[in-house]
Image (spheres, grey):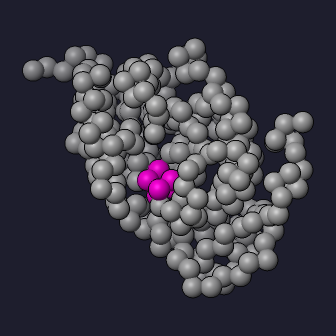
Amino acid sequence: MSVLDAPSGLFGENRSWVFAFPNSTSKKSHASNSGIKTPSTSATTSRVRSLDEILLPFISRSLDAETLGKFQLYLDLLLKWNARINLTAVRDPEEIVQRHFGESLFAGEQLALQAASTLIDFGSGAGFPGLPIKIVAPHLRVTLIESQQKKATFLREVIRSLQLDNVGVYAGRAEESSLKSQIVTMRAVEKLETALPIAASLLDAGGKLALLIGEAQSEIACGVLPKFDWDKPMPIPGSRARVISVGTRLEQPKLP
């Protein structure tokens, strides 16, 4: 039996970290309005920072209640599954919202998403930044590339639970695929110099490669992919060393 098919008791006691929503007094009332099913919880909201408040430094506009409900459910699932498989080393719920959801949304803000129709998240892991971007840009057709089967199963469960359309999981090696996209995102991958040419091969001509990396790694990216037109790296809010580095694949070599 796969993890996807396992009963909820496999993970032990259900735990749900409740954040206060704008114009909402409880998670239950919010969930009923959004139509999203959430894990059961006996927790009650106290004075905790709202998801909207935590995400504010990373986005240019507030998110509506339905979108916040999807992020809440995503967080619940991540915490639940992370107790059994290693999805993230970050354990604190608020830090997860900042480091994973917030940084993913900040990356999306740099990509002119409305002008694109396809996105590949290379080495998706627990779904970052691909799934948060999909949540706020539902028109995108998204492919999550994740070769580790347990993580791929988690991604499928999030997609099912959040009722996301036009999202697929490719549980194989990117270099063995024939996938192409207008946007490719990549975050926290090992062996950056090796991964960059593979990520570039997934791009259409004129497509954008978005890297969530350390500031020092931006120079590596420019050196490995010289035929990309690289924007100035954007510092990630609240981070001392992490940046978003966006490069456009040139159809012709850039003139001197």
What residue lies at 63% left-to-right and 27% top-to-bottom? 147
Q: Residue furthest left?
A: 256
Q: Which residues are magenta?
A: 99-105
How far from the left and from the top, in percent, is residue 214?
A: 33, 43
Q: Quadrant of residue 211?
A: top left
69, above or below 229, in the image: below
**Numbered label tally:** 0
Does the magenta-highlighted stretch encompass residue 63? no
Q: Quadrant of the C terminus?
A: top left
Is any atom of residue 171 visible in this view? yes
- Of 256 and 239, which appears nearest the observer? 239
Q: Quadrant of the N terminus?
A: top right
182, above or below 241, in the image: above
Is any atom of residue 118 visible in this view? no
The secondary structure making up most of the magenta span is: helix
What residue lies at 34% left-to-right and 49% top-to-bottom? 242
How far from the left and from the top, in percent, is residue 99?
A: 47, 56
Q: Quadrant of residue 143?
A: top right
What residue lies at 70% left-to-right and 44% top-to-bottom? 85
Asked if residue 234 lies left or right of residue 116, the reply is: left
172, above or below 218, in the image: above
How far from the left and from the top, in percent, is residue 248?
A: 31, 30
What residue lies at 78% left-to-right and 72% top-to-bottom? 41
How far from the left and from the top, in percent, is residue 117?
A: 50, 36
Asked if residue 104 lies left or right of residue 227, the reply is: right
Q: Quadrant of residue 238?
A: bottom left
70, above or below 40, in the image: above
